[in-house]
Amino acid sequence: MKEDSVHIIKRPHIVYRTPFEILGIFVLDGSGSMVEQTARGWTKADTVSMAVSDVLSWLKYSRNKNGFSFAIVNYDHRSVVKLKPIFVKDIEEYADYNPMEGLGGATYIFEGLKDAKMIAEEFLNGGSNRHVVVMLMTGGVDMTRHKTVPIANAIKRMENVSLAGCFFETVGADTSAMIEYADFVQSLCSSPDDFRTVDDYLSLREFFFSSISNRFHRLF
């Protein structure tokens, strides 16, 4: 008696493609002020690293992961491209994103935005229906305001680009000074909704999530 043959049907591997591509560019303060502690007892730099890691790890498994890429620019009075644009699905999970690595000097926001602008331009030139969210985070006084304002305005004038920003408050610092610094960062943003003042890990992580989701919702 002949044995029945068994046919194994292989299912095709389906890659769900999104009708858009979003590049998130983290522009992270790596100046000396980031050694200051938050209310939880962590340094600002460690808080930033954990928040970025959480956001990227969460998006890595989201249903829209094929539509997201990320880049990271760290700055003090210099700028370092920590991570060139890479699909979120290919990002290493729970890596160390401490923005002070190799840095720790003065705060020149202009330097970070300068590299972010170049990365955004290259990404937008690579295809249609592409969008960029620049997420600026600073925890100190900007020493290059005369340069920062023009480049922030140039970024905001770019088609399909939004600039979000947050100011990381220092525990116990002068309140009036903190308000003045925060107002300046807000003036750099694309809209009031793109700004946030943060003072701990949870509020910083929420800022990153909301910046991405705001751009996502604007597309639909």
Image (cartoon, rainbow, N blue to C red):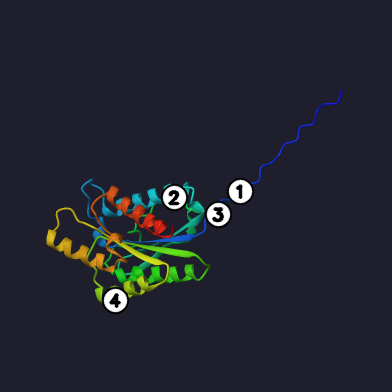
Image quarter hosting the N terminus = top right
Horizontal arrangement in the rendering, residue 12 relative to residue 114 (left or right): right
Residue displayed at 46% across by 47% down: 62
Alpha carbons under labels 1 and 4: distance apart: 47 Å
Task: Please state the horizontal and vertical placement of residue 109, each as a whole percent of the image.
Answer: 30, 68
Nearer the camera: disc 1 or disc 2: 1
Q: Name the residue under label 3.
A: 17
Horizontal arrangement in the rendering, residue 53 relative to residue 168 (left or right): right
Instruction: Indicate which disc, 2 or 3, sits on the residue closer to the N terminus.
Output: 3
Secondary structure beneath dot 3 equals loop
Alpha carbons under labels 3 and 4: distance apart: 39 Å
Task: Please state the horizontal and vertical placement of residue 124, each as a whole percent of the image.
Answer: 48, 69
Q: Name the residue under label 4.
A: 147
Image quadrant assignment for residue 172: bottom left
10 Å crowding of disc 3: few (<14), some (14-19), many (20+): few
Secondary structure beneath dot 1 equals loop
Vertical position of residue 83 compared to residue 2: above or below: below
Task: Please state the horizontal and vertical placement of residue 35, each as a whole percent of the image.
Answer: 25, 56
Nearer the camera: disc 3 or disc 4: 3
Residue displayed at 48% across by 51% down: 64
